[in-house]
Image (cartoon, rainbow, N blue to C red):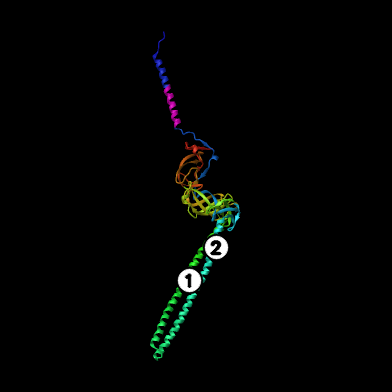
Amino acid sequence: MDIIREDLKQKRQRKRWITGVITAGALLAVFILLSGLEPAAPSADRASVFIDSVKRGEMLRQVRGPGVLVPKEIRFISAASQGRVERVLVKPGAVVEADTVLVEMSNPELLQANEEARWALNAAEADFVSRTVTLENDVLNQRARLAEVRGDYASARLTADAEGELVQDNIISEIQWKRSELLAEQLKERLEIETERTEKMRDAMQAQLRAEQARIEQFRNQLKLRAELVEGLKVRAGIAGVLQELTVEEGQQVTIGTDIARVARPDLLIAELRVAETQAKDILLGQPVNIDTRNGIVAGHVLRIDPAVRNGTVQVDVELDGELPRGARPDLSVDGTIEIDRLENVLYVGRPAFGQANSTVSLFKLRKEEGDAVRVQVQLGKTSVNVVEILGGLQEGDQVILSDTSVWDDYDRIKLD
């Protein structure tokens, strides 16, 4: 009969347990080893990324903004008179002089008012002449009375003096002499009164004539105003230039102040740039600017900085110092580069895709020997259009990837093929 051996059964079980423990330990060791390894680095084509080297030296800070060319001198022409548009003589785009008539209007009521003002002035001038003659006659009559009184006084004075000598010889009575003296004194007083009256009359005449002249001047100013309104029916350019816009049509009724036309000088242009508000804080008047007209570069300088921010940008006006290239005209799109300042002896590199001033960004720095790039934290300083100052994290000669590396945000190392 067979005898069951319990010791063999136990040995087989022990062997299975040992094998299981060894297998589990091996699997655990492999798991721990694999978990400690870095994930496989992704690969990138070296030609598909933009690489730049860190340099030390002078860094030119610039700000760039798009814009347009606009006339420096623009004349907006509005209606100085109310009327109806009869003729449009010039079309937009035409070259005009200061006295070129753009539009002719009509207003019969204004013409009638002008004639009435002319008649009123003529009547006032005629009244002035008539009044002058009348007053001068009055003054002459007064002068005649004055001369008569002066003669009477002189005669009375002579008589009184002569009788004064005769009364001493008892030729005439003393009473007669005193009567003659009294008459002379009366005539003397009358002479003084008539003299004063003559002066007053002359002053009164001058005052009345000045009043008449003021009245004539009033009528003359009214006529001048009416004449200007009539002349305003012929709308003129006002300056030599190019007619850019005409906003009225024949038959249209126009009121005073209505915009009619816009004339600009095409030979005097400035650039209006739109600069991001975050970059405009360092712009100052007089800073040099290069304007790219896409047909040449024109030098200029900052003329005006708009104090207001509109849609996230600040308007910067640039005076053009150089000669404009052919084809430059109003409303031409341009790009402007403003030179802010120059930083001496600083580390700088090309501006990363998402690099902002005074911030910390992560960049991939190349390792030539390993043939890969590792992520490093870089502290940025002042920025320019194409370059940025390096404050920390990189050394002179280091090469970094400036392209957008957001697809590798989960990796700290990439291989370069």
Q: Position of residue 81 (x, y in %)?
A: 54, 56
Q: Residue at x 42, y 26 (%)?
A: 25
Question: Which residue is disc 1 drawn over?
Answer: 205
Q: Residue at x 50, y 73 (%)?
A: 137
Provide the residue designation for mark 2: 119
Q: Amino acid at mark 1?
A: Met
Q: Amino acid at mark 2?
A: Trp
Circle 1: element type: helix
Is the residue under label 2 in contact with that under label 1 (CB below 8 Å)?
A: no
Q: Position of residue 389 (x, y in %)?
A: 47, 47
| Res 60 visible | no
Where residue 307 appears, as percent x and y from the top left, is 46, 51
Give the residue drawn at x 52%, y 69%.
130
Residue 375 appears in the picture as rendered: yes
Asked whether residue 343 is drawn in magenta, I would say no
**Vertical comparison of 11 with 111: above or below:** above
Which residue is farthest bottom?
169
Q: Tell me if 158 is positioned left or right of 331 in this view.
A: left
